[in-house]
């Protein structure tokens, strides 16, 4: 029996759209501990989510610097 990941890629995507710190922690945990449990389609979705978070983080940081 194949072990299932804690969250599906779709669940992680939904959590990361909220942009809260818990979503980041979950994504890091998944990448670190459970990546081998996902199939290739889910890994592609996780990569997409990672890029969304990275881009949003850069944009949020830039906007904070504009306010100074």
Image (tube, rainbow, N blue to C red):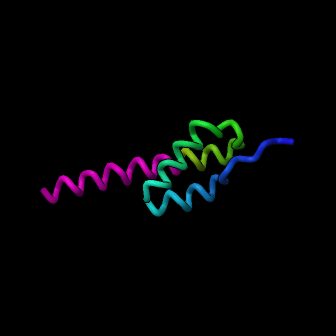
In which quadrant is the N terminus drawn? top right
Residue drawn at the location 66% of the way across and 48% of the way down: 42
Counting the numbered discs, the total is 0
Quadrant location of the C terminus in the rendered image? bottom left
| Residue farthest toward the right in the current orientation of the protein | 1
Magenta residue span: 49-68
Residue 50 x, y percent position in the rendering: 49, 47
Asked if residue 11 is positioned above or below residue 31 in the image, the reply reads below
Q: Is residue 57 above or below residue 31?
A: below
Q: Is residue 64 magenta?
A: yes
Residue at 49% in and 48% down: 25
Outermost residue, left direction? Answer: 68
Q: Nearer the viewer, residue 45 or 32?
A: 32
Percent of width and height locating residue 2: 82, 41
Which residue: 67% across, 54% down? Answer: 8
The residue sitting at 23% across, 57% down in the picture is: 63
- The spot of residue 16 in percent (x, y) is 50, 57
Residue 34 in the figure: left or right of residue 62? right
Viewer-nearest residue: 21 or 57: 21
Magenta portion: prevailing SS class: helix
Q: Position of residue 6 (x, y in %)?
A: 67, 50
Q: Does 44 lie within the magenta span?
A: no
1 lies left or right of 35 = right
In this image, 24 relative to 13: left or right? left
């Amino acid at each position: 029996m194949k072990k299932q990941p804690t969250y599906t890629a779709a669940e992680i995507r939904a959590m990361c759209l909220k942009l809260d710190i818990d979503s980041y922690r979950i994504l890091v945990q998944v990448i670190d501990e459970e990546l081998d449990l996902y199939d290739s389609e889910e890994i592609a979705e996780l990569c997409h989510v990672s890029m969304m978070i990275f881009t949003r983080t850069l944009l949020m940081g830039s906007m904070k610097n504009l306010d100074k």
